[in-house]
Amino acid sequence: MSAEAIVEVKKIGKIYDGGVEALKDANLELPRGRLSTLLGPSGCGKTTLLKIIAGLIPPSSGEVWVKGKKVDGPGPERAFVFQDFALLPWANVLRNVAFGLELRGTPQEQRFEIARKHIAEVGLSNFESSYPHQLSGGMRQRVGLARALAVDADIILMDEPFSSVDEQTRRKFQEELLELLRHKQKTVIFVTHSIEEAAYLSAQIVLLSPRPGTVSKIIHPNIDRGARDPDEIRRDKNYLDVVEEIWQILKQYV
Amino acid sequence: MEQKSRIVSPVVWQLLSFALVFGLWEVAGRWPISFAFPPFSKTFMALLRMIADGSLPKAYLSTLQPLVIGIVLCSIAGIGFGIGMGLSRAVEWFSLPIFIVLQAAPMAAIIPLLTYMYGIGLTSKVLAVVILAAPVIVMNSYKGIRNTNPSLIQMCRAFLGTRRQEVIKIILPHAAALIFAGLRLGLAMGFIGIVIAELLITPTGIGDLITYHSSVADYPEMFAAIASIIVLAALAIHALERLERRLFPPEIRGLEDVR
């Protein structure tokens, strides 16, 4: 892993108001242009860590640096994909995807043009004027992803984006996500509790221990993804070894 | 086939239900249960007479004036205040207890006090409408603001929305449906307020019509006046409810996101 770090997490700790210690001394470097996964059991603070990187939650101690600058709030170089989609129910797909640009004051014609491009990328071209309630969970999350892509951030933060999506859709979505990212120089930080998902998607897997969450191990799966059939990857020996390795570590926490 | 029967049957059932109620009323009136309880047919004829001789329209002209003024006042000030309470902790801290008390208190008890302070004019009647309608309008606006899906607010912040954009693009559209529902409930309370005011404070309008006909034992006329205000209130609120469903269909209200 020779890529330089685009996100540096330095001694991050988080204690919530009620006194719950969610994170303790988390240290981490996330390489530019790669997909890194934060993986761990429920309540290990992985979503908290992601939201701290996003600047949505202030840490209790420690610092996050993104592209050489200290984080003190959300920034244009980071875009977020929410677990519950967070789409405006009263706005159609086009406006939802363009919403990040709308907030930045991009003129309507221009932002709709950009939004249409990304709607096409996630395969929803025929649904531009549909409302979120008319879409399935998987389609809603595509809208969420398109919205994040539309603001052209370097870093995309994804908080368990496929957790409320059924298994078939989830697999399809994972494959498409890899395909989509292959052509873009995006850094993705992905929170999941699925070992298979982490092993399938990531260049780097960060294992977090349960509360208070701290980085217990970093794994770099050496899986050749270049132009291979997704099912072939799922039968790859390295892939299976990584899944097994992670399971052996996580088993202790269950 | 099935769809057709679905369209037809509610109307049929509604008509049947009306027929049943009016039929029972007719029977009860002819029995008679009480000398002061006229059958439906006589009441209906009395209603037509009162419309024809102009006494009913004239009464409504004077009843609706304070009602409309009161509701408009509540809509502007009440919604504004509720939104203020929802957005600002300071305003909330200061005024939430007042409105909780106002909402729980039997406001009719305060109406004689209004007469004492403002006499028997239009002011008192408008105030009677306002004190009954305002709490529910304010509280609904407040809850509408407070119930905004926190995830949407976080989304707005993550995509660099300012506080102003957060209020205009997320919080207010999200609250609009509840605010409108508050207006509808406020109108229902306003009808109660105006009738109480006309019965207790100033014998004018529809309240006067009820009092007068009851005092001279014109029971069909009295019942017609009472029935007319009930029907009017029901129709007005039903119309608002339909408008509400049209403006804010449940799917796009954002209610599904409130857990």
Image (spheres, coloured by chain):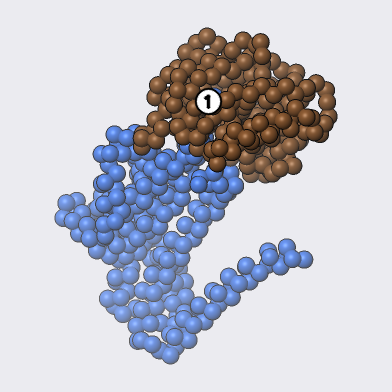
Chain colours: A brown, B blue
Image quarter for residue B120? bottom left
Element on which disc 1 rests: strand
Q: Which residue is mark 1?
A: A215
- For residue B193, say whether it is visible: yes
Q: Residues within 10 Å of mark 1 (few under 14, many from 20)?
A: many
Residue nearest the observer in this picture, A37 or B91? A37
Residue A127 percent across, percent down from the top left: 72, 36
Looking at the image, which residue is at 19% across and 51% down?
B118
Q: Is residue B259 above or below residue A207?
A: below
Q: Nearer the viewer, residue A179 or B135?
A: A179
Residue type highlighted by circle 1: Val
Name above or below for residue B120 compared with residue B69.
below
Direction bottom: furthest residue? B31
Q: Is residue A25 left or right of residue A130?
A: left
Q: Is residue A176 visible?
A: no
- Furthest toward the left, the residue is B116
Q: Residue B29: image x %, image y %?
A: 43, 85
Above or below, comparing residue B240 to residue A208 in the picture: below
Image point (54%, 27%), residue name = A216
Q: Answer above or below: position of B65 versus A176.
A: below
Q: Chain of mark 1?
A: A
Looking at the rendered image, the quarter that the N terminus of chain B falls into is: bottom right
Where residue B10 sits in the image (x, y, percent)? 62, 67
> Residue A67: horizontal and vertical position, in percent?
55, 11
Number of callouts in the render? 1
Residue occupying the point 39% across, 78% down: B220
Q: Residue at x 36, y 74 (%)?
A: B222
